[in-house]
Amino acid sequence: MNKLGFIVVAVLLVLGSVSVFARGQKEASGEDKITVATITYTSEIEWFYILEQNYKAVADDLGLELIQLDPNADPQTQVDMIEQMTQRGVDAILVSPVDPAVIRAACEEAMDKGIFVLIQGQERTAVPWSTANFGYNEKQMGALTGEIAAAAVKEKYPDAKKIKLAVLGDPGWASSDVRMGGAKEAFMNNLPGVEVEVVVDKVMGATIETATNVIESALQQHPDLRCVVGINDDAAIGSVGAMQSQGIDVIAEACIAGAGNNKGTWPYIDRGEILGSVDLNHRGTAEVALNAVVKLVNGEEVPGMMYIDMIKVTKENLGEWYKK
């Protein structure tokens, strides 16, 4: 090898050493951490607030850098946040969409730039364009809610031949019809021989305020309405308040169930005002999502749809969560 060749090799070795040294310094200083942005629906809904807490706990366990953003249920704000995180160059974005159609272009732009976008709470059939989706089997979640309410009907109205049902959802959530359809189906299937008249369906009832307003209005037309299945626990709490405002003895007469297992609901279940909820396993949700991010960053594949286990929460097993 001539003198010029030796010089070139020496320079390359030095540059290589510098590169390795610099990379080692970056890892040691923590600059090479996987960075994940979480953009939820709104922390005003307790379920999302709890999810954010679990994202933080799991991210700390995994050594991830976490950026947490709240769009306050505004789709354009969510778009702006996705674009900001894309410009920042995070490794992954976890989104609980306010409106999947509105955020799609921003998400696709992020993915075009090598950012993994994981969508929470949407089935793959509804949102097939993300890196992956994670969440619950919406029909199964609804079914568990419907089963709880139906069991209460059997106990409180064993001789009923006809009963009225209100189904509170959120038309803005693509998964709402699937979840609440599962609730209706399970409620009816578990009451053979009982005619179920659905008097409220496909309306906004995902907050305490909206649920209160819907049920109060429904009671004006259907004063004998006593059964409610809600898309979440806030829907159930609002339904309790609406019935109580009309002088209904909720413990003796109502058959109300929600989903989410939020701590604010535990006293209602303990008192028997709400017959049950569905534990949505916030910790499991965060673990599934953030472990998937780690795998993706390391070049591994993850399923297009990742489901989280759920269980019924009733007065019988409430003590697992509610420590009075």
Image (cartoon, grey):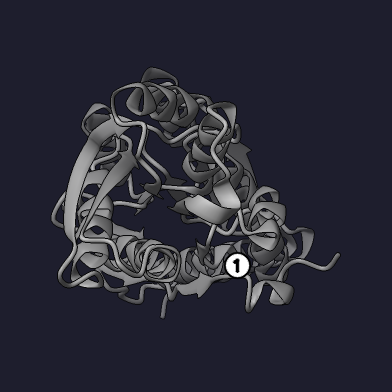
Residue 56 visible in the picture: yes
- Indicate left or right for 43 with 138 as reference: right
Residue 64 visible in the picture: no
Q: Tell me the SS state at disc 1.
A: helix
The foreground one among 82 and 261 is 261
Q: Is residue 177 above or below residue 136?
A: above
Q: Is residue 72 above or below residue 5?
A: above
Residue position marked by numbered label 1 in the rendering: 283
- Indicate left or right for 199 with 281 as reference: left
> Looking at the image, which residue is at 86% across and 64% down?
324
- Which three-letter amino acid code belongs to the residue tagged 1? Arg
Residue extending farthest front: 159
**Circle 1: is it few (<14), some (14-19), or many (20+) Cα within 10 Å?**
some
Q: Looking at the rendering, which quadrant does residue 103 occupy? A: top left
> Looking at the image, which residue is at 43% across and 24% down?
216
Query: Residue 274 in the image: x percent, y percent?
Result: 56, 54
Query: Residue 196 in the image: x percent, y percent?
Result: 19, 53
Query: Residue 20 in the image: x percent, y percent?
Result: 62, 68
Q: Looking at the rendering, which quadrant does residue 62 occupy? A: bottom right
> Looking at the image, which residue is at 70% across and 62% down?
270
Q: How many marks?
A: 1
Query: Residue 36 in the image: x percent, y percent?
Result: 54, 51
Q: Is residue 180 above or below residue 17?
A: above
- Indicate left or right for 83 with 35 as reference: left
> Looking at the image, which residue is at 57% across and 62% down?
282
